[in-house]
Image (spheres, rainbow, N blue to C red):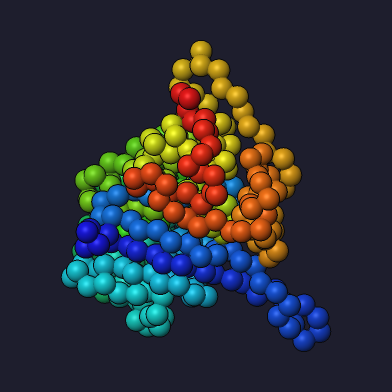
Amino acid sequence: MADEYILEVKDLKQYFPIRSGWFQRVTGHIKAVDGVSFAVKRNEVLGLVGESGCGKTTVGRTVLRLYAPTAGEVWYRNAEGERIDVAQLSSKQVKPLRREMRMIFQDPFSSLNPRRTVKELIGEPLVIHNIAKGKAMEERVADLMTEVGLDPNYMERYPHEFSGGQRQRIGIARTLALSPRLIVADEPVSALDVSVQAQVLNLLQGLKEQLGLTLIFIAHDLSVVEHISDRIAVMYVGKIVEITGAERLLRHPLHPYTEALVSAVPPADPDIKTQRIILQGDVPSPANPPSGCVFHPRCRYAQDICKQQEPQLTEVEPDHFASCHFAAELNLVGIGG
């Protein structure tokens, strides 16, 4: 069944050196991503969720080789069906894959050059990859703007003349310019108003179905991720602690951290009363993570083994993976639980 996966990530690590002193010697490492493994099927949306600083964005950027990984494998199946370990490629070898693997950035204003028109911004990838220039490029830009719900007559305008939601649509059009197969959407709606968030989420969902896209959707808000994702992976201090289908994760979490995240999601029915789980303490530093289970200092179910032995991400139930020593024993509460 491996051929149905467009992306397979195995034991991915991304460490950033900590330098200090006059000679800037390396005195330690920030373990932003520490042994992450997951796979994404064709035409699937995998949600990647967790608190700020847990390593979500670093995973996305490392998968696309915007960062060279410290260790691990990133197997991508290209349009010809060939499996390529992106982690082993040089910068020159990665360039052809940039057409197939693209990113939507978090801040639609800072990711767009304010000195360039919308036509230049959306058309730039087409020019760089020698796909279209001049009139052909302009026609492609017009088609892309229509596709994301923008008026092509505005292509000569500048980013500051658009609202936040419109700027994010420009960013999405720019991402789609090269007809990618895999898109990493890095918190694409976190900087937008709630009403505009819904519009952009609906747009991405529609484009995914229309164009057959595969998405890794990164966000810190579980209520946003659940609306667009087929499966959800939960990250904590550089590690994936749980991964399964979106609905199953919300209704039947197996990791205590996921249970706390789910408790923060407001129920659709206002008459349903839920008990919010308030985690004690601070998120550990990825430069000095705790021994054993990284979540044990904040876990209300922690036992001695949690402090001493690191749990592995294992299949506790069919297609439901969790890294908790007591995942099979705890009766955790989800939405509607």
Q: In this view, does 294 lie above or below 82?
A: above
Residue shown at the point (25%, 68%) measured from the top left: 78
Q: Which residue is drawn at 50% across and 43% down?
A: 327
Task: Please provide percent x and percent y for residue 247.
Answer: 38, 35
Residue 221 seen in render: no
Give the farthest residue toward the right: 22
Q: Position of residue 197 (x, y in %)?
A: 45, 37
Quarter holding the N terminus is bottom left
Specify the farthest residue to the left: 80
At a point 59% along the width and 71% down the height, the residue shown is 15
Relative to the observer, which residue lies in front, 13 or 175? 13
Give the residue displayed 48% in from the left and 38% down from the top: 253
Mark count:
0
Along the line of sight, the residue nearer the viewer: 256 or 287: 256
Instruction: Describe residue 228's horizontal placement relative to residue 307 as left or right.
Output: left
**Front-lying residue, 237 or 131:** 237
Q: Position of residue 209 (x, y in %)?
A: 24, 44
Q: Where is residue 319 in the image (x, y as percent from the top left)?
A: 34, 47
Q: In terms of depth relative to the viewer, which is nearer, 1 or 184?
A: 1
Vertical placement of residue 326 versus 128, above or below: above
Outermost residue on the bottom side: it is: 23
Q: Looking at this rendering, what residue extends furthest in the top direction?
A: 271
Asked if residue 115 is positioned above or below residue 275 in the image, the reply reads below
Is residue 230 among the parts visible in the rendering? yes
